Amino acid sequence: MMPKINILIADDEELFRKGIRFLLERESEFNVIAEAENGQEVINFLSSTEEFPDVILMDLKMPVINGVEATEIIHIAYPNIKIIALTSYGGKAFVTNMIDVGASSYLLKDTNPKTVVHTIKQVFTKGFYYDANVIKIINENIHSSAGKRIKRDLDKNLLSKREVDVLELICQENSTKEIAEKLFISPRTVEGHRNNLLLKTEAKNIAGLVIYGIQKKIIEVSLDFD
């Protein structure tokens, strides 16, 4: 049984916040612990709360501190909190900026409710979830000088065979437990390989590792977006 997923909703439109909260609270696995109307309110909440969100639904265009700035700050200070962009803006620059600063997924506000629920669950259990549109933008950015999000141009040989194995299974959306079972190693060893991958690639999170794998063509991955 999946544990309760604590969620914070950050959006400057109260009607939207209340609507998405109503939707999410119909799910038995979800627990909406807070709302915020701008990035500063999110940061203030995190600095004073004893119950942290597992997932933040983050709008982009908000006053005081916008969603991109807030995501960057939160990802550094609270790396275990997963952030899903939920916005009206679907341009490549918006998607790229949010992924750059550590967002684990990117959704548009006209997304159907079922997809929002599925994405939250995937991000909570797997660490990331990209739909076909985001993957398309990532692939396009591979061939763009503006899309070089991985700072160092690493040689494939810098990653060990086992690290590549772990990276491939991460990209196939396997959990730590599933990776351990498939490679016949302990979950702690999987975590060690994942930490090494993060250090070597300078990726910010699991989502960044997926991007790295695609960009460097270290792994061939075909994600299921049904």
Image (cartoon, helix red, strand yellow):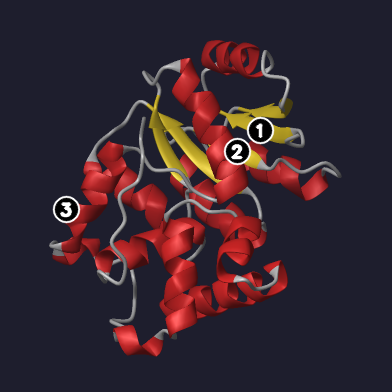
Q: Assess disc 1: are there few (<14), some (14-19) or many (≥20) residues with their C-alpha within 10 Å of its C-alpha.
A: many
Q: Amino acid at mark 3?
A: Glu
Kindly identify which residue carries mark 3: 140
Kindly identify which residue carries mark 2: 56
| Alpha carbons under labels 2 and 3: distance apart | 27 Å
Quadrant in which residue 217 is drawn: bottom left
Q: Amino acid at mark 2?
A: Ile
Query: Is 122 displayed left or right of 99 in the figure?
Result: right
Nearer mark to the viewer, of 2 and 3: 3
Query: Is 8 displayed left or right of 75 in the figure?
Result: right
Q: Assess disc 2: are there few (<14), some (14-19) or many (≥20) residues with their C-alpha within 10 Å of its C-alpha.
A: many
Residue at position x 50%, y 59% in the image: 206
The front one of 179 and 191 is 179
Q: Assess disc 3: are there few (<14), some (14-19) or many (≥20) residues with their C-alpha within 10 Å of its C-alpha.
A: few
Q: Is residue 78 visible?
A: yes
Q: Give the structural element (helix, strand or loop) at label 3.
A: helix
Residue at position x 55%, y 43% in the image: 123
